[in-house]
Image (cartoon, rainbow, N blue to C red):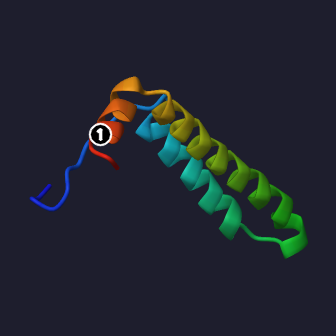
């Protein structure tokens, strides 16, 4: 935090442990042995899961009335 910006945190329905576990699984899949064609479907599925986690978090934040009020009042 500084005079130029304010840092706020808001909870989402996912834990840091869940995110870490999913990201590690993605990295493991990404760097595992095998041909590109064998790995691609697995990597794609892991990427979709990570993307879904992001969507869930964003949806949750958009439904946070306190956050939305703050953003409106600060003319963000």
Point out residue 25 in the picture as x, y percentages from the top left corner.
Answer: 62, 52
Residue 2 falls left or right of residue 73: left
Q: To which residue does mark 1 refer?
A: 9
Image quadrant in which you'd find residue 3:
bottom left
The local secondary structure at tag 1 comes to loop
Point out residue 37 in the picture as x, y percentages from the top left corner.
Answer: 90, 70
Q: Nearer the viewer, residue 44 or 57?
A: 57
Point out residue 48 in the picture as x, y percentages from the top left corner.
Answer: 72, 50
Q: Is residue 31 above or below residue 49?
A: below
Residue 10 falls left or right of residue 56: left
Q: Is residue 2 above or below residue 55?
A: below
Seen at 82% across and 65% down, the residue is 39
Q: Quadrant of the N terminus?
A: bottom left
Let me know if residue 26 appears in the view: yes
Q: Residue furthest bottom?
A: 35
Seen at 19% across and 57% down, the residue is 5
Residue 34 falls left or right of residue 46: right
């Amino acid at each position: 935090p500084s005079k130029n910006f304010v840092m706020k945190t808001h909870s989402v329905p996912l834990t840091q442990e869940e995110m870490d576990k999913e990201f590690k699984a993605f990295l493991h899949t990404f760097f595992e042995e095998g041909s590109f064609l064998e790995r691609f479907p697995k990597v794609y599925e892991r990427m979709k899961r990570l993307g879904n986690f992001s969507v869930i978090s964003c949806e949750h934040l958009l439904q946070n009335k306190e956050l939305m009020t703050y953003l409106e009042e600060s003319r963000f």
